[in-house]
Image: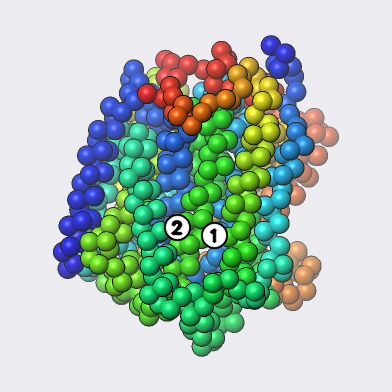
Amino acid sequence: MPSDHKTGLRWSNWNLLLILPLLMLITPWFNKSEPSVFGLPFFYWYQFLFVPLGVLCVGIVYVKTKDEPVATGKPDKLGVDDLDEGAN
Amino acid sequence: MQWTELIVFSALFLLVTVMGFLAARWQKGDTLEHLDEWGLGGRKFGSWITWFLVGGDLYTAYTFVAVPALMFGAGALGFYALPYTVILYPLVFLPLVRMWSVSRVHGYVTPADFVKGRYGSHWLALIIAVTGIVATMPYIALQLVGLEAVLRSMGLNGSGILGHLPLFIAFLILALYTYQSGLRAPALIAFVKDILIYLVILVAIIYLPAKFGGWGEIFSDAQAKFDATPSKADGTLLTGTNQLQYATLALGSALALFLYPHSLTGILASRGRNVIKRNMVALPAYSLLLGLLALLGLVAISAGTKPIVNQATGRPDTNTIVPELFGANFPSWFAGIAFAAIGIGALVPAAIMSIAAANLWTRNVYKEYIKKSASPAEEAKQAKLASLVVKFGAVAFIVFVDPQFSIDLQLIGGVMILQTLPAVAIALYTRWFHVYGLVAGWVGGMGYGMWLLYNIGNPAIGKSHFAGSALPLGNISIFGWHPFGTSTTQIYVGMVALFVNLLVAVVVTLIANKAKWFNGTDQTDPSDYHVDEDNPRVKPVAAH
């Protein structure tokens, strides 16, 4: 197995995307009321936008790194219907 | 007594009770007499089951009542729950799959099992296990607070010990089917819980704001209420002093969540690495829900909701805000569904937490110190009994001790569990820290964290100790020297304690390396951390 060599860490530059959602912690950027959307102050809807952003970042990292060899893994190519296949 | 609500609630409660008992036969393995089966559901849950299970586990009933209650009382600060659960998944995405792989190769059931394998020290593992159990216990008790808030809103608000009887009955039933079915019970019930929760919150978030004049109206009502209070810390925006507290509380909570043994139980029960990765993408659906739910705390201000007085303690209980809001503004039958969603929402995490605590007790205390020769069947038996003890301990906590004490303890629990980060999470990547460094860091972080929490008072609610987790930077002193002067900027205690923990661990590690002290034996191999489900090296499930 070529992937069984002695490295403890595998790195992909895509992983850097995982840092992006942490920008949400810089409160001075968004601690204000205006502009409001549907009556929701900026503070609230700005943070809601980070939910899809977080999903996008993690999703891209997942898709871009899933073909990398793990210690013997067939690449993950399951369709939605097969997600729970084998669990029964 | 609110009969319609009570009948709908009871019917749904009965449904999950039947499911809980039948769960033992669901996707049955060869035997239930093994921790892999009873405690981890056979280690074979696919993506959908894991999504419901982990979602049901992390987003608890207490979260669903406490977060809006905090928004109701303090405003913007309570919204930290959203950044907390958004940054959570990118943070844990990589470490969790490593934890799954190494646990699968060596058959680890608990985080303390991993620590023992990694450092060859059952003492370090004991520290991690005890921290996990102590941090989880009050968390279970808090699920009862959530359940009781609903029961009291339905009119089951008796006084004295008898007032707790409905709670006791609900928990007895939960204890019995968890004993019989193990992790399969909450996994199956989680489907019902989560579907009900999604239904209720989506309806609430569309219907209620419209009813009270839209978000603009709601926010100006909330701001007017916060302006009228003497406190300067509340408001619909953060203030100058609590922004750092907001960010560090979100970060600290995110770092802590998957160190809790019950969160890891859901992860280790999944079938493979890709199940976990897909869930890290899909779980934020719950975060969106939690963010919307938090806003209901402000809706309750507009609606003029009043928390009901808990007749067992004689004080108004802000945790009843959401149940009261639903009860007053929804038709009875839908309020009944909403109450059932919160009530069942308490059962799922309570069951998983008690299983996780029981696993820790069995693997890292019982088998290590009491009966080394315990067979897998004896381990399963011990864990089942331990899960009963843990649950009744939690009930006793609520009945005999002021519920406020559980809330304080949970606050402390978060700071405590964060102190296991170097030994559990950092050890997944490197063995750079010396085992003595990890122990010393734990002692330092734990001691300092507890001391800081003890000294936080809040005169407004008449408490001089354990009144919160917000620490003014000016209060930090190093032998009388105040590095931050008299700053009133607040920070989350857990992060300060973690910093001290890491500092001590680094210093002691350097000393230990210099002195060439023995650093334990590492049972794991670097390639173990990448093994996937179809690798021949994974340990067979429930092998005796």
Q: Residue at x 57, y 29 (%)?
A: B273
> Which residue is nearer to you in this view: B376 or A2?
A2
Image location of residue B541, percent across then percent down: 45, 19
Q: Tell me whether circle 1 and circle 2 mark residues in contact (CB < 8 Å).
A: yes
In the displayed structure, does residue A12 sit left or right of residue B307? right
Q: Residues within 10 Å of mark 1 (few under 14, many from 20)?
A: many
**Residue B471, disc:** none
Disc 1 sits on a residue from what chain? B
Q: Which residue is mark 2?
A: B63
Q: Residue at x 48, y 80 (%)?
A: B217
> Which residue is nearer to you in this view: B331 or B312?
B331
Res. B471 image quadrant: bottom right
Instruction: Identify which amino acid the numbered label 2 is placed on.
Output: Thr
Image location of residue B544, percent across then percent down: 42, 15
Instruction: Identify which amino acid the numbered label 1 is placed on.
Output: Ala
Vertical order, B537 against B369 (above or below): above
Q: Residue at x 34, y 37 (%)?
A: B188
Disc 2 sits on a residue from what chain? B
**Residue B81, disc:** 1
Res. B90 image quadrant: top right
